[in-house]
Amino acid sequence: MDLVTPGFGLIFWQLVTFLIVLFLLGKFAWKPIMNALNEREASIENALSAAEKAKLEMQALKADNEKLLAEARMERDKILKEATEAANSIVETSKQKANEEGARMIEQAREAIENEKRAAITEVKNMAATLSLEIAEQILKRELSDKTAQQALAQEYIREVSLS
Amino acid sequence: MKRLFVLLFSFLTLTAFAEAPEEGGEFQPGDMITHHIADDYTWHFADGAVVYLPVILVDNGEFKVFSSHNFYNEHHETVAYDGYALEHGHIVKVNEAGEPLEDHAGLYDFSITKNVASMFVSVALLLGIFFVIAGRYKRNPKAAPRGIQSFFEPIIIFIRDEIAKANIGPKYERYMPYLLTVFFFIWFNNLLGLMPGGANLTGNIAVTLVLAAITLLITVFSGNKSYWKHIFATPGVPTWLAPIMIPVELIGILTKPFSLMVRLFANITAGHIIILSLFSLIFIFRSVAVGPLSVAFATFMNFLELFVALLQAYIFTLLSAMYFGGAVEEHDHAEDHH
């Protein structure tokens, strides 16, 4: 059967042509194409992994930032609290000091008043004594003529003096 | 009238109807179909559009090159030329009287036949297209593909990932040039064969024989120790069976490429025969009414053939890859058979 009998010439040309095509395409087409495809795939893969890495880094950075922010916030709260405490204590001590000062001043004033009073009383007493003496002198000068009267008077004075 | 139809269809349709039946002669569909799927020394696009291809003969070491036009006279009848003549589509030696000689020893026919010329066209296309694509990849390897490049890139990647990597394994890279070349060679030629006036190249047994033989040689030469061990001392088979097993395995080496050869040849030739037969119906029934039906069926068949063209290229490449994969596979589990 002619159809299934391979022709010699066609086998020859097919073999030669196919091998030449295989060589030419293999060297000048498939090699650069496969290389380019591999290279492109590798670069895409690299880009993807780099993006993934960048994403992770960003996340880490964000977490760091948040941590820093939280720390700062805590620090601020602490400082505020301390400041408030300091202010409070200052006010407190000032109040106490003021109170103490006030109390001391009142005490001093009271003492001064007391002293003045005592001095005044002493003066009054002295003056009264002087007056009494003068009165007594006057009376004595006048009354000493009467002895009994003198005695009665003296007695009376003494009683009065001791009473006062 | 009949001749007019033939002329019409030869322009409108496919490979069919380059050969008009002789004026007044009975239409012979079998002859017409056989003529169309067989090789020829002329390239017959349509009546009146015939390219006479060069005939190259080596007769006992002597080169003879002349146009095949010399075999035809002005009435398109075959005549003898320079001691050679066409006899049933082959060149034979003839004597002075034009009688074929019995002895053809030393005569080798290297003619650029229709199939060879068609193959050159396909090769020019292959080289042109893939050199252009390769140039783009070389200039700009990381750029996104565009134009013709983006059409072929998925196919190349498919062959690499789904055919080579999947069936050969880690050593796939060195088989890529052959797999890609054979795939595109078969596909392009299948498609060219479907063109009007195209040659039935991939439906020629010589072509598929060469392709299958190359697959066989690559398989045999890349066979590793375990591949040959499985053939000459199949694990798990008793030694006394070796006289049966070794011939069976050796035949097995040959049947694989033989099936490749026959599958491609038969599929493509059958497709051509079916389309030609459908058109022949018009002339067998000598009725214009059959025409639309035939054209409808032939159009459907042609679409099917477009699919078969791709499918057969894929199958040839896939099976080749599987045979290579079997030859380079490492059988680590070989000991488990015992």
Image (spheres, grey):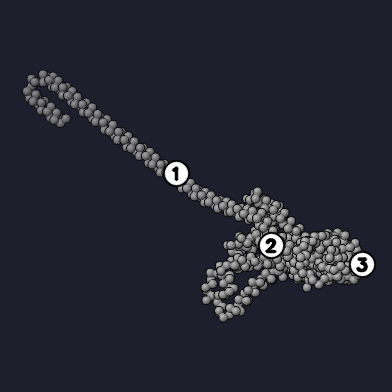
Tell me the residue at 55%/53% (across/down): A49
Co-location on one chain, circles 3 and 2: yes
Q: Percent from the top left, x then y, of residue B262?
A: 72, 70
Instruction: Tell me how far mark 3 sits from mark 2, CA to CA.
Output: 43 Å
Q: Amino acid at mark 1?
A: Ala
Position of residue B89 in the picture relative to residue A112 (left or right): right
Q: Is residue B286 above or below residue A151?
A: below
Task: Depth check: give the residue in front, B87 or B171.
Answer: B87
Residue B277 makes an appearance in the image: no
Position of residue B323 in the picture relative to residue A7 (left or right): left
Circle nearer the N terminus (3, 2): 3
Task: Depth check: give the residue in front, A103 or A123.
Answer: A103
Q: Amino acid at mark 2?
A: Val
Tell me the residue at 91%/66% (across/down): B2
Tell me the residue at 75%/58% (across/down): B120
Q: Which mark is residue B182?
A: 2
| Secondary structure of the residue carrying numbered label 3 | loop
Q: Which quadrant of the figure has residue B267?
A: bottom right
| Secondary structure of the residue carrying numbered label 2 | helix
Q: Which mark is residue A102?
A: none
